[in-house]
Amino acid sequence: MSALIPTQKVLRHSVRRQVLDALRAALVDGELVPGEIYSGPALGERFGVSATPVREAMQQLALEGAVECLPNRGFRVLARTPRAHGELLEVRALLEVPVLLRLARTLPAEAWTALRPAAAATAEAAAAGDLARYADADRAFHRAVLSLGGNEQLVEVAGELHRRSQWPLPGAPRTSPAGLVEDAAEHTSLLEALIAGDLCRAEGLAHAHFTVF
């Protein structure tokens, strides 16, 4: 009997994680519209689960600043302004670019070469035009870069800022497949500059990257 309890907890956590991942993807895709109110039972029916894991996932999104809880009504997707989006990109650049350049001066080419699969994953998602998949691959690539510095706190903070910067702006056009391909190509170009030890080019590419996606 006691062996069943951990299994039940794992299964519940797994459902909650799957719902949370699905809701995050819906945010990136624009399926969850800023300003709109969504109920736990309705979303639960959509995902084929009870309202409980949906509410738990939505509460996590509320902590992340994506939605607000409305008692007895559901959850409203919060809208961000272009200024707020720009501020997120600026903060990300302030965190990530100095770390990248410091690592560029100290790490061997082999360390950067090892990140080629992560860059390739972004290119594959971009070629498929899958925005949610690209968002995941994009965060994974940046996380892999920052992880080379060994500062886990910075990696977590930068990752959360990155996630928030991927939420679409109200009324903004959906990111085009061409835009995704261009953004993914910057990952590859940046890696090649780092592998070649071209710090000037790497710095320019790194700064430019935070003005795109």
Image (tube, grey):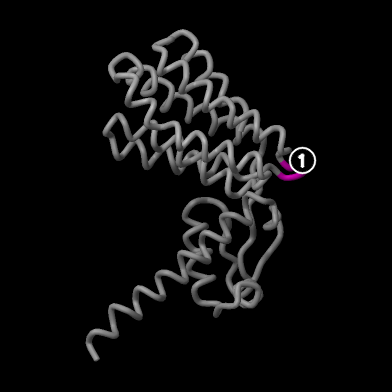
Main secondary-structure element of the magenta-colored stretch: loop
Magenta stretch containing residue 173, yes or no? yes
Q: Is residue 208 above or below residue 163?
A: above
What residue do we see at 61% from left, 33% from top?
213
Residue sitting at the far bottom = 1
Look at mark 1 in the image and give the residue it sits on. Answer: 173
Point out residue 68 in the picture as x, y percentages from the top left corner: 57, 59
Magenta span covers which residues? 170-174
Question: Where residue 143 sits: x, y (%)?
Answer: 41, 38
* Type of amino acid at the residue the image marks with label 1: Pro
Q: Give coordinates of residue 81: x percent, y percent.
A: 66, 38
Residue at image location 60% in from the left, 25% down from the top: 211
Q: Height in image: 103 above or below 167?
A: above
Tell me which residue sits at (43%, 41%) in the image: 159
Residue 91 part of the magenta segment: no
**Residue 41 higher or lower than 26, as above or below:** below
| 52 versus 102 height, above or below | below
User: Neighbour class for label 1 at 10 Å: few (<14), some, many (≥20)?
Assistant: few
Q: Nearer the viewer, residue 129 or 5?
A: 129
> 104 or 119, which lies in front?
119
Describe the element under mark 1 as helix, strand or loop.
loop
Q: How many marks?
A: 1
* Quadrant (top left, top right, bottom left, bottom right) of the N terminus: bottom left
Find residue 183 and report its horizontal and vertical position in percent: 61, 30
